[in-house]
Image (cartoon, grey):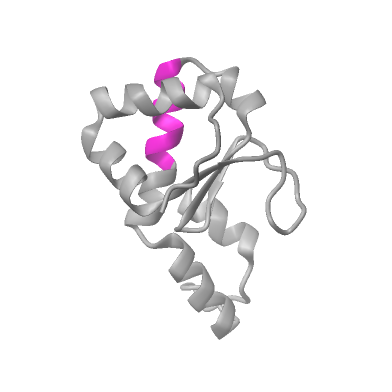
Amino acid sequence: MQSQQKRSPCVSTAISALLVQQPFFASLLLDLMEVVETKTLPDGSNLRVAATNGHILWINPEPFAKYTVAEQIGILAHEVMHVILQHSKRDYAYRLLGVGPDLKAYSHGRFAHAAD
């Protein structure tokens, strides 16, 4: 379910461009994710540009606006790919196991780096 917040112009433009240029990614973005503009993540950490938990796409509009529209489309598609590849679910499963796919001690940083 999409929230009814007002979007910043750069985010609206990027989503519109995604709809025109990459309708597959746009349909998944709009159907599967809530888009939330914020400077911080729910855990209180600073949001550099964009992140997702598989259900919510958080975008920090100030740094996002510094990218070209083509780069913004790439950022949106990148975050949608995290959902398609179920990175959040896999990360959660490895965290519960305490080890990663390499059987080394779980590290969220290492998982996030590999997922990107």
Quadrant placement of the N terminus: bottom left
Could you tell me which residue is drawn at 64 percent across and 67 percent down?
Answer: 107
> Is 72 included in the stretch rendered in magenta?
yes
In the displayed structure image, the side of residue 1 where residue 60 appears, left or right: right
Q: Which residues are magenta?
A: 69-78
For the view shown, which residue lies furthest in the right direction?
44
Q: Main secondary structure of the magenta part?
A: helix
Could you tell me which residue is drawn at 58 percent across and 26 percent down?
Answer: 64
The count of marks equals 0
Could you tell me which residue is drawn at 53 percent across and 29 percent down?
Answer: 7
Foreground of the two, 116 or 102 = 116
Q: Quadrant of residue 30?
A: top left
For the view shown, which residue lies furthest in the front direction?
4
Q: Position of residue 94 (x, y in %)?
A: 52, 76
- Name above or below for residue 103 compared with residue 18: below
Q: Quadrant of residue 42?
A: bottom right
- Name above or below for residue 57 compared with residue 89: above
> Is 89 included in the stretch rendered in magenta?
no
Q: Position of residue 25 (x, y in %)?
A: 29, 39
Foreground of the two, 106 or 22 = 22
- Name above or below for residue 86 compared with residue 20: below
- Name above or below for residue 106 compared with residue 109: below
Q: Position of residue 4 (x, y in %)?
A: 50, 41
In the displayed structure image, the side of residue 41 where residue 25 appears, left or right: left
For the view shown, which residue lies furthest in the bottom direction?
97
Q: Position of residue 66 (x, y in %)?
A: 60, 17
Foreground of the two, 116 or 75 = 75
